[in-house]
Image (cartoon, rainbow, N blue to C red):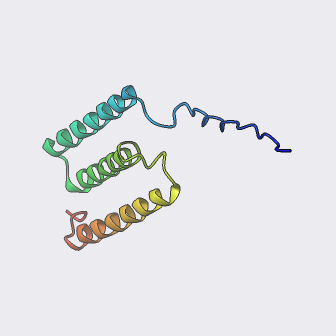
Amino acid sequence: MAETEEHVAPPAAPAHPGSHPTAKEYVRIGLILFVLTALEVTASYTDVSGAVLIPTLYVLAVIKFVLVVMWFMHLKFDDRRYARFFVMGLAGAATLYLIVLISFRVFAR
């Protein structure tokens, strides 16, 4: 007596709304990056001391880096280990950049 096995297809993966950005979200992030870049260019053409200009540009660059990495490189939606590698790289680059700026006495001007 052969038993018949009922073959049931596995359920479809549940749709996670917001798990990946839509085209509208990409455009929104692109516009935010455009505005941040415009702020950087505007800041660089103003007559502000280096003690204010450098940290301003530094913060804007970090914000842009995070937006690009998290949205356009999809790290926001991938395994957290990948994001940790990028954060470690960012922390290393930021530390090196600050050491160079301090060694050239940029903030003392």
> Residue pushed farthest top?
24
Marker count (numbered) = 0
Q: Quadrant of residue 67?
A: top left
The answer to whether 106 is drawn above or below residue 32 in the figure is: below
The residue under the point 32% across, 46% down is 64
> Residue pushed farthest bottom?
103
Q: Name the spot of residue 79 as percent of width and height, x first.
A: 51, 54
In this rendering, position of residue 7 left or right of residue 1: left
In this rendering, position of residue 99 left or right of residue 49: right
Q: Name the spot of residue 47 as percent of width and height, x first.
A: 15, 45
> Residue pushed farthest front?
1
Query: Quick one: 7 or 23, which is closer to the camera?
Result: 7
Q: Quadrant of residue 34?
A: top left
The residue under the point 43% across, 34% down is 21
Q: Name the spot of residue 41 as percent of width and height, x first.
A: 17, 41
The answer to whether 65 is drawn above or below residue 87 in the figure is: above
The residue under the point 46% across, 37% down is 20
Query: Quick one: 31 or 44, which is closer to the camera?
Result: 31
